[in-house]
Image: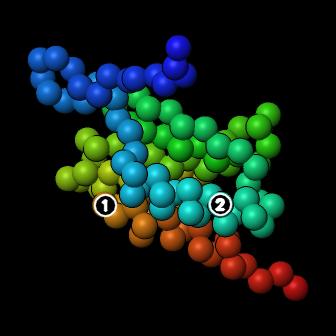
Amino acid sequence: MTNVVSLPTSSSRSGKPSQIAFDRKELSAILNVYGQMVSQGEWKDYAMDFLKNKAVFSIYRKASEHALYRIEKVPALSKKQGQFAVIAPGGLVLKRGHDLKTVLRVFDKQRFKVTP
């Protein structure tokens, strides 16, 4: 018996994915930022959700709290505002764009903030 779970990636008729996911490069960029913030003690936990219309990477300070930030990939917006977004609690969109690395730069200001 194996612990590997195979998830369906495409529907039989339309050829469209039955769920949206982050690809390897996207997940690597997200986990790079996440790892840096964890090493600074800012973030403690994360969750990933793969839905029919979007993929969500949620970031938590503690596992029992609400998400501090959500990084979303919504391919339906790829030709409009951009498929990637960083969303704060309450639904405030901090940054949206076509390039994930550019969108993730919203965390640079927090990563290098100077405290007196």
Q: Where does residue 60 sit, x and y in percent of width and height?
A: 70, 45
Q: Is residue 90 visible?
A: no
The colouring scheme, among rainbow, by chain, secondary structure or one colour, is rainbow
Residue 27 pos. (x, y %): 46, 52
User: Which amino acid lies under the numbered mark 2 shown in the image of this protein?
Assistant: Gly
Q: Which residue is mark 2?
A: 35
Q: Quadrant of residue 3?
A: top right
Q: Image height check: is 71 above or below 32? A: above
Asked whether, in this view, residue 58 is left or right of residue 60, the answer is left
**Residue 98, label in figure:** 1
Q: Residue at x 73, y 54 (%)?
A: 43
At 61% from the left edge and 38% from the top edge, which residue is drawn? Answer: 47
Which of the 4 quarters of the picture holds residue 31?
bottom right
The three-letter code of the residue at mark 1 reads His
Assess disc 1: are there few (<14), some (14-19) or many (≥20) residues with their C-alpha within 10 Å of its C-alpha: some
Task: Give the structural element (helix, strand or loop) at label 2.
Answer: helix
Question: From this viewpoint, which residue is outermost toward the top?
Answer: 1
Q: Position of residue 13 (x, y in %)?
A: 12, 17
Tell me what residue is drawn at x 42 percent, y 39 percent. 55
